[in-house]
Image (tube, helix red, strand yellow):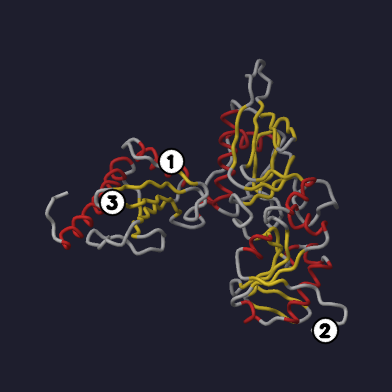
Amino acid sequence: MPETLSKEELKQYKNDVKHQWIDDLIKICAAKVGGRVYDIHAGASTQSPLYTPDRDLSRTSNIVFKFKTDSSRNELLGLVQKSIVVTGRSVKLYLPHKLSTVGCLTYTEENKELGISITFYIVVKYKNARAFRNLPFTNDLIGERMKATGTDYSNRRPDTSYEHYILNKINTELYKLGDHLPVKLKLAGKTYNDFIGFIPGKTGSHADFVGIDKECKEVCYISHKQGSNASNFQQYSGITSRAGRIADHEEVVNFKDEITEAKQESDFNQMAYYRPIEDSKLKGMAVFGEDYELSEEGMNSVTLFCQGDVSISKGSGNRKRALDENTIFLRFHTHNLPQTSLPSLNHRGYKPTLGARKGEGSRKIEGSGGTLIGVRGGVYTESYIVEDRQSEEFPPPKPDEVF
């Protein structure tokens, strides 16, 4: 830094240094991931103003590079990460991150002498928000076995880009670690022989992922939520007619009737309302599906409630005979809960809780008191509906109370 600078010259010098840091990343991207489309935002959000080379950065300490693609977001993010790492910069991947469910790369440039720094956030988004629905998520073995057994699951598609990410990650690793053959899968204390991978659940069912064996028979069912705590997902289930038997449960019917009689839509502008659930069966129905305790495991009585990213690893030892199967361990990072572990969700903010909050204009709660438009009802985590927002308990009326 020049020794004698006026106040204005020092400000400009600091601004130039920040611009140079941004130019450095632009050059790295041009050299290693050239041809990729991206926006640069001057701030810590993808909604921050777009960066321009003549922008005053004196008050800017965060920059977001938002890449856009219609192919695999994961692969592009990994390519960008490698491109930055080889320059000697210390890059961290945060997964999930508030800016992206598939992860965010971050690193910081700092000049202590000048007292300035910029933290860079690099994310990858789809050009078309629904592009993931047309991307592959199975593996060659699943395709081969479907053809051999005459099974067709082609109408099954993941509902979100994060579900696509999980499915693609599991199926890719299973195929590789299993030597392109069926495996012995270990998941939450259970063993599944002749296992070949996961497909999405049926539209409208509680199962997000369905495990299949080499005969393409469904052998396990997973309800999956993203995140690492009870605040990272919205609800276990809805309470409208689309929720089936859940919507007809006495506690749910009473909640809908009483809240539509007692509240107006304007009451939800600044307040959410909740009611603890008394019946453990209703809690189980919300978490594992409407057929909980009524049927064997299935689309609406899932095997496991899982949360977070997933890890896949190979057991010790190698196959010794052609028909031997490698043992593969699969574990979700936050939760891997079977139906017998339902009571454990009464802790750390996960307790299933009836609630109603302000929602999109298309949302509504219908009850004996009428219809509340723009209000979303559901069975939420206690953390989400009680602790993370301004909320008020809406207890059942006393016997002599009338709305």
Task: Say which of marks 3 and 2 sits in front.
Answer: 2
Report the Cα–Cα distance between label 1 and label 3.
20 Å
Tell me residue 387's x, y (percent).
Answer: 63, 63
According to the picture, the residue beneath numbered tag 3 turns out to be 22
Left or right of 67? Residue 194 is right
Query: How packed is label 3: few (under 14 Cα within 10 Å), some, or many (20 or more)?
Result: many
Query: How packed is label 1: few (under 14 Cα within 10 Å), some, or many (20 or more)?
Result: few
On screen, 57 above or below 319? below
* Disc with the residue nearer the chain's start (3 vs 2): 3
Circle on res. 363: none
According to the picture, the residue beneath numbered tag 1 turns out to be 78
Residue extending farthest to the top is 320
Identified by mark 2, the residue type is Val
Report the Cα–Cα distance between label 3 and label 2.
64 Å
Q: Residue at x 48, y 48 (%)?
A: 103
* Disc with the residue nearer the chain's start (1 vs 2): 1
Residue extending farthest to the left is 4
According to the picture, the residue beneath numbered tag 2 turns out to be 402
Task: Say which of marks 1 and 3 sits in front.
Answer: 3
- Pick the residue in front: 160 or 20: 20
On screen, 50 above or below 150? below
Q: Quadrant of residue 349?
A: bottom right
Tag 2, which secondary structure?
loop
